[in-house]
Every structure is written in structure tokens, then in C-alpha cells.
Amino acid sequence: LILPVVLLAAPLDAWGYGVLLCLYLCMLFGYLDDTSAMPWGELKKGTIDLLVALATAFCLSKGREVTFWLPVYKDAIVVPLALYLPLATAVLWFTTNATNCSDGIDGLAGTLTLFSLFAMGALLYGVIGYRPIADYLLIPHHPDGARWAILTSTVAGGLAGYLWYNAEPSRVLMGDAGSRLLGLLVGVAALAAGNPFLIIVVSPVVLVNGGTGLLKLLLLRLLKRIGFDTTPPGAATPEQAAGQHVLVKMLHSVRFPLHDHCRRNMHWSNAQVLMRFALIQSFLTPLLFVLLVKIR
């Protein structure tokens, strides 16, 4: 339902409609995975996410070099297309999967992403798209900032409606169809603002919660390839568990995503996880925003 509203409300150009198509494809592939009789494998899903992220990055660049502004550096940087595409693709792929990993408790991924989208909408409209404020903060002005703000805020409004009527206990599961779309959109908004580090500012809890799970999986795969025994504690014999490397034991001692660790190991309820994670992000975002924008 969000997509037709975006078509009516957001004044996008051809490249913007290309990004919108990529958002839809990301949602569609997530839905197909959810409804598949045999769940898609990691390689298939990762490859599809990579291709969608690459297409999105190309549409955002409009096929030319892109201007970035970075923390602790006041001058704008012109990034050639050949460098922008792999960097932007990596950012979009990571935000898509980190947000997807955070979708495990009713309202968690949606609430945290809602904060992110409203923050990005305000930044795109009031700073990036408004020349006097952008000049004052030494940030490159993007005339299309307001367009991206309308897109971001429209989706945020639809998400807020979903959360209002779908509060715990959830009746309609978001699934990969929703979480992947939201993750990709947060990455799109940060890149449209010209600073990929904004991901850390507007989605710190999502990145830590879901991103650390991806990091743990990568580390365990690397350790197993090297020759370490990475058998999970539940499947290992006492002798195997005693002989495992200390790093493997440390990785297995913490559940990922972190909301699972808080819920099962620390015995937080779903409501406690949601409220505490939301509070942490609501405190971190303004603090990190000041550090990112003013210390330059």
C-alpha cells in the first residue's frame, strides 16, 4: 500500500523511479523467499541482494560522479562512479541484511527503522535540501534532498500506521518483504544525503543488533575454513566443547542477533527489549548527529 501512495506523493524523476523499482524488487524477493516451500539459501539471497543494491546504487548516482561530505573534514569530496558503485553497493547490502536480522521481535525492526526514517527525512528536508542551513553547516546542498525526504517520510508514515494497528501481539508478520525494504530505504536515504556514515547516526542499534550477527557468522565461517572446530554448543560433545579455541567459545557465548541474547540469556521480555533498544537509539541518534555534523 505504501508504493502507490509514494507514486502519488513523491515528485521523483526517472532515476528516482528506478530507485523505487529497486525498493519494490527488494520487497518482492523477500516475499517470494517467505512464501517459498523451500527457503532460499544464503548464497541465493545474498546474490540477489547484491544485484538489487548495485542497481540501486547506479540509480542514485545517475550514472555520474557523486559528491560526498564526511565527518571531521569540512571540504566536499568528489567520488568517481567506479569507486562510488562498490562502496554504495556494500552500504546498501549491509543495511538491508542488518535490518532483516533485527526482525525477530514484534515491532522491533519497524520501531527502530521508523526513528531512522524520520531522522533522515528531517535531515534531507531541513538541512541537505535547504541551502542556508546546508551552507552554514558546510554541507553540500542537494536540490533533490526534499524529494528524497518526501519519499522517506511517506514510507515512515505507512510504517507508523502498520505499527499502530499491529502492536504486540502481532497479527501481520512483517517478514523479509518488509524488513529488507526498510533496510534498503535507510541506506538509500543516507546515500542521497551524501554521507554514508549517516547510517551509524540514524541506525546505531539496528547495525549493532543485526550487523554483529553477520560478523559472527563470517568469523565462524573463516575459523572453520582455517581448521578450528566451530560446532555449536548444543551439538558438541563435552570433549569437543572443552577442546574448542577460546575465540570460538567467546563467539558462541553470545547469541546473535543481540535481541535474542537479551531475551534468552538475560531473560528480558519482548516489551523490555523493544523499549530499551528504542530508548538507546533515541539517545544515541541526536548525540551522534551533533558529533558528525558539527565536528568538521
Image: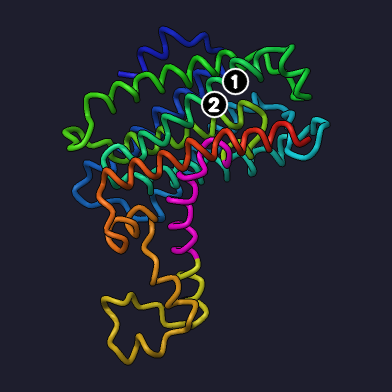
Under mark 2, the amino acid is Met
Residue toward you, 71 or 194? 71
Question: Pointer 2: what residue?
Answer: 120
**Rendering coords of residue 51 (x, y %):** 50, 41
Crowd around label 1: few <14 · some 14–19 · many ≥20 (10 Å): many
**Rendering coords of residue 103 (x, y %):** 33, 44
Residue placed at 45% from the left, 30% from the top? Answer: 115
Residue toward you, 97 or 169? 169
Give how far apart the Cα atoms at labels 2 and 1 are.
6 Å
The part of the chain drawn in magenta is 200-218
Which element type, helix, strand or loop, lies under badge 1?
A: helix
Q: CB atoms at circles 2 and 1 under 8 Å apart?
A: yes
Is residue 261 placed above or below 100 in the rendered structure?
Answer: below
Residue toward you, 134 or 23? 134
Q: Quadrant of the rendered structure where residue 262 is?
A: bottom left
Crowd around label 2: few <14 · some 14–19 · many ≥20 (10 Å): many
Question: Any mark on residue 124, and which?
Answer: 1
Magenta-drawn stretch contains 205: yes
Question: Any mark on residue 38, and which?
Answer: none
Residue placed at 53% from the left, 18% from the top? Answer: 149
Asked whether the viewer can see residue 65, the reply is: no
**Rendering coords of residue 239 (x, y %):** 32, 92
Q: Quadrant of the N terminus?
A: top left
Q: Quadrant of the rendered structure where residue 140 is?
A: top right
